[in-house]
Amino acid sequence: MNSYSCPRCRGQQERLGERCVRCGADLAPLARIVERADAAHDAAVRAARAGRWAEAGEQASIALALVPDDVDTIVLLAKITHRQGRRKRSAELWARAGELDPGRTDVPIALAELRKPVVRAPARRAKKKRRAGGR
């Protein structure tokens, strides 16, 4: 679960209300940013489930730009970038998720998987077409 920091007093809040529980500052603009980030995260999930990886990456990146420490969005983008073949970026994102939430058990598993060398199947040679007439 995310906690939110009041821009005025830096007081931490578990839930984002209209006003800071500590200093009374108006948090409505921050709430709108978080709502937009949530919408982008949800759009990224839908796009990923449909196999639209470029769109999924774009939406997850928007969500992450709006709420940079959202571990769920970081993990989502890590999975998307891995699927896109961007292993280095995926590893960076997984490491960031581990820094922000050291208790996540999926982080070390994903990083270990990304450290394994990529084994590619040998390229197939194109068969030559046989000509009629014995050659």
Image (tube, grey):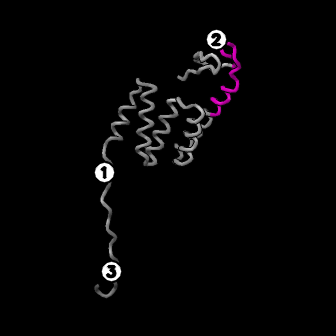
**Vertical comparison of 121 with 23: above or below:** below
Q: Residue at x 32, y 62 (%)?
A: 123
Give the residue drawn at x 31%, y 88%.
133
In the picture, the disc for residue 119 is 1
Residue 14 covered by magenta stretch: no
The spot of residue 41 in percent (x, y) is 57, 36
- The kind of secondary structure element at disc 3 is loop
* Amino acid at circle 2: Arg
> Which three-letter amino acid code belongs to the residue tagged 1?
Val
Tag in front: 2 or 1: 2
Q: Residues within 10 Å of mark 3 (few under 14, many from 20)?
A: few
Identity, as a three-letter code, of the amino acid under mark 3? Arg
Residue highlighted by disc 3: 130
Q: Marks 2 and 1, Cα distance to the nearest angstrom?
A: 55 Å
Magenta stretch: give its range: 18-36
Q: Which of the numbered marks, if any, corresponds to residue 22? A: 2
